[in-house]
Image (cartoon, rainbow, N blue to C red):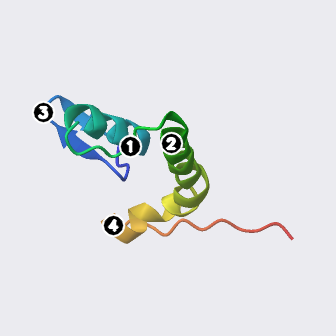
Amino acid sequence: MGKIPCIETSDGFLPESGAIMEYLEDTHPAKALLPNNAYTKAKVRELNKVLELYIELAPRRHLGSVFFGGPVALKRLKK
C-alpha cells in the first residue's frame, strides 16, 4: 500500500500504526508497549490516534516525493 509505518510479519504486512502496536503487544507480551492500567492504556491509544489523524496525515501527501522521488504534491490555498 506504500504506507508508513509498515511492518512485515510472518503472516504478511501490517501498515497501520494502531494495528502494528496491537500486533507487537500480542506477539511480544514480555515487553509490553501498553501499561496495565485500563485508563492509561486508553490514553496511549488516544494519543496514537491523535498522532495518526492530525500529525501524520498532513505530511502524508509528501512521502512519495521524499522517499521515492515522485512528484511534489502541491495544494493551492484558497484566497
Q: Nearer the viewer, residue 43 or 8?
A: 43
Between disc 2 and disc 3, the foreground one is 2
Q: Amino acid at mark 3?
A: Ser
Secondary structure beneath label 4: helix
Q: Residue at x 82, y 66 (%)?
A: 78
When asked about the image quadrant of residue 34, the answer is: top left
Q: Secondary structure at mark 2?
A: helix
Q: Residue at horizontal 32%, vertical 64%?
A: 68
Horizontal side of 54 relative to 66 (left or right) equals right
Question: Of label 4 and label 2, which has the lower sequence position?
Answer: 2
Residue that badge 4 annotates: 67
Say whether marks 1 and 2 touch (CB < 8 Å).
Answer: yes
User: Looking at the image, do the residues carrying marks 4 and 2 touch, with CB atoms under 8 Å apart?
Assistant: no
Answer with mark 3 or mark 1, whichever residue precedes in sequence: 3
Type of amino acid under label 4: Phe
Q: Outermost residue, left direction?
A: 10
Which percent across, then down, holds residue 2?
A: 34, 49
Query: Helix, strand or loop at disc 3?
Result: loop
Which mark is nearer the camera, 4 or 3? 3
Residue 10: mark = 3
Name the residue tied to disc 1. Answer: 34
Q: Nearer the viewer, mark 4 or mark 1?
A: 1
Residue depicted at 48% across the width and 65% down the height: 62
Residue type at mark 1 is: Leu
Give the quarter of the figure containing the C terminus.
bottom right
- Amino acid type at circle 2 is Arg
Q: According to the image, label 2 marks what residue?
A: 45
Q: Which quadrant would residue 67 be assigned to in this image?
A: bottom left
Choose the circle earlier in sequence order: 4 or 1: 1
CA separation in Å, label 4 and label 1: 30 Å
